[in-house]
Image: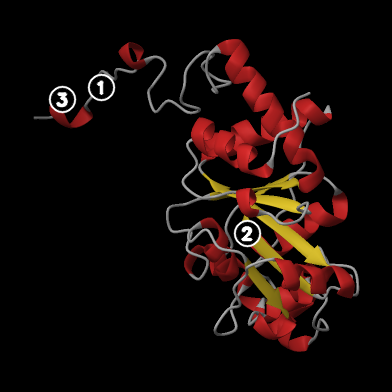
Amino acid sequence: MEELSYQEMQHVLMDELRLMHYPIAVKYFFDQAELDDFKERVSYYLPAKALTFCQAEIGARMEGITVLMGKEQLGCSNAKCVFGWKDIDAAEFKSHIKYCESLEQAERFVRSKPRMKEGLLAAAVSPLADAAFPPDVVHFYCDNMQAYHLVVDWMAVMDKHPLRPNMTMNSAACAGNVYVYNSGEANVFLACSGSYNAGKTERGEINVAIPGKDIGRVVARLKARKEREGGAAITRIGHPFPGADICKNCPLIVFKKAKDPAAATD
C-alpha cells in the first residue's frame, strides 16, 4: 500500500470529497518532553482569550493554523470536565438541567460522558496537512454524504459493521473526539448547542472523527476507489462527486389529487 504524507492525504480528501473545511489533526499531549518539543519546533498560535474547544478548532479548519490549547486557554467548563481538567460538580449538573428531566438524570448523563484519562497537559489542533505529529484523532466537519463516505470507508478497511456512534449532550467536539481517543473507534455525531453557534456550524455540518492510526488506510481506500472506478462516489460509481444532489426517480415522483371533499359540496 502506498504511504501517503499528511499533505497528500488532505489533498485527496479535500479534492475528492469536496470538503469545505480542512480535516483537523487532533493531538493530545500527556508527556511534558513531547509537549516541549512541539513548542520548540512547531509554529503555533494560542487563543488570545479563553475559548471553547470547538472554537479553537475554527483556527485549524477555517484559518488553516495550528492552535495549542492548555487548561488556561480552555474557557468551557463542560470541555474541562471531559478533558479531566475539572472535577465533575453540582454546577455542571445544573448547567445540563435544560436538557434533562431532573437533576438526578442530569448528574447521570454528565457522568456518563467520555472522559480523558488523567494527566492531559494540552491539546493541539491543526489542518491535517500541517500535522507535526501523528494525530490521535482526525476530526471532520462535513455534510451528510461526505460523512457517509468517510464512515463507510472506515468500516470497510477496519472490517467493522455496524458503526455504533457515541453522541452526548452539550459536548459534541470535545467529548466526540475523546470518545474516539479512548475507544479507538470512529464516531459520527451531531453538533451540540454550543458547537452550533459558538463553534460555527450554522451550515448544519455533521461531525466525523476517525482514529489517527486509521486515517492513512481510509484515504488509501478512497484513492484506490477513485482509480479503480473513475470517481470518488460510492453511491454513484464512476461519478466525480460524492453526493450528487439529484433525485434518482424524478419522473416517478408526481402527485395527483384523488379526492377533494370541499369541491364536492360546492
| Cα distance between the residues tagged 1 and 3 | 9 Å
Residues at marks 2 and 3, CA–CA distance in whole angstroms:
66 Å
> In this rendering, does residue 42 appear at all?
yes
Q: Which residue is mark 3?
A: 264
Tell me what residue is drawn at x 54 percent, y 83 percent.
48
Name the amino acid, label 1: Lys
Tag in front: 2 or 3:
2
Name the spot of residue 49 as percent of width and height, x first: 56, 85
Could you tell me the amino acid type at mark 3? Ala
Identify the residue at horizontal 47%, vertical 68% (top origin): 197
Q: Is residue 30 visible?
A: no
* Colour mode of the rendering: secondary structure
Q: Which mark is residue 259?
A: 1
Judged left or right of residue 139, residue 22 is left
Q: Secondary structure at mark 1?
A: loop
Q: Quadrant of residue 40?
A: bottom right
How would you rate the neighbour count of disc 1 (Cα within 10 Å): few for under 14, some for 14-19, many for 20 or more?
A: few
- Taking the view exactly as shown, the residue that stands out farthest to the left is 266
Q: Circle 2 sits on which residue?
A: 126
Residue 1 at x, y = what percent?
A: 78, 23
Residue 139 is situated, as x and y percent measured from the top left of the image, at 65, 51
Which numbered circle lies on residue 166? none
